[in-house]
Image (spheres, grey):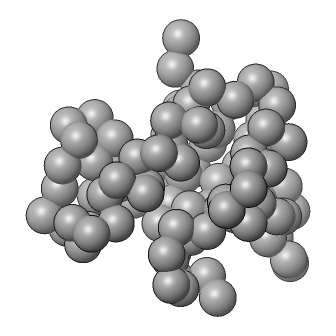
Amino acid sequence: MWVLKSFRSKALAELWSTGSTRKIDRRLHERILRRLDRLDAATMVKEMGVPGFDFHPVHGRLQRYSVHVNGPWCLTFEFTGGDALRVDLEQYH
């Protein structure tokens, strides 16, 4: 059963489902997919606290979390009932 239930970004959904997209810089693909794999395997949000992911709640947004990808890019998501929802790639910082 997939934990990643929904995406805000169509490009991110395409990358997750096909392993490739032209809409996201190719240099980020491997790092994004590694984080999405971990998020998909997580049963509790605290499992995203992997060294190098810089996992933290997003300030000012209730129940939204972030993991660092590269430079200003982060994956943001909600985690409810063991599912990741509204996963997005954002310039968060």
The image shows residue 7 at horizontal and vertical percentages of: 46, 48
Q: Residue at x 73, y 66 (%)?
A: 54
Q: In this view, which residue lies farthest toward the left?
A: 22
Q: Using the image, determine if residue 70 lies above or below residue 72.
A: above
Q: Nearer the viewer, residue 42 or 10?
A: 42
Farthest residue toward the top? 1
Task: Look at the picture and state if 33 lies above or below 31.
Answer: above
Number of numbered callouts drawn: 0
Q: Residue at horizontal 79%, vertical 70%?
A: 58
Residue 1, horizontal then vertical, whole percent: 53, 11
Residue located at (18% from left, 49% from top): 20
Q: Position of residue 92 (x, y in %)?
A: 61, 82
Going by the image, does 75 lie left or right of 80? left
Placement of 87 over or under 40, stated as above or below: below
Residue at far front of view: 51
| Res. 10 in view | no
**28 sits left or right of 43 in the view:** left
| Residue 33 visible in the shown view | yes
The picture places residue 74, in percent across and down from the top left corner, at: 56, 70
Q: Residue at x 76, y 24 (%)?
A: 43
Horizontally, residue 47 falls left or right of residue 15, namely right
| Residue in front for this viewpoint, 71 or 21 | 71
* Quadrant including the C terminus: bottom right
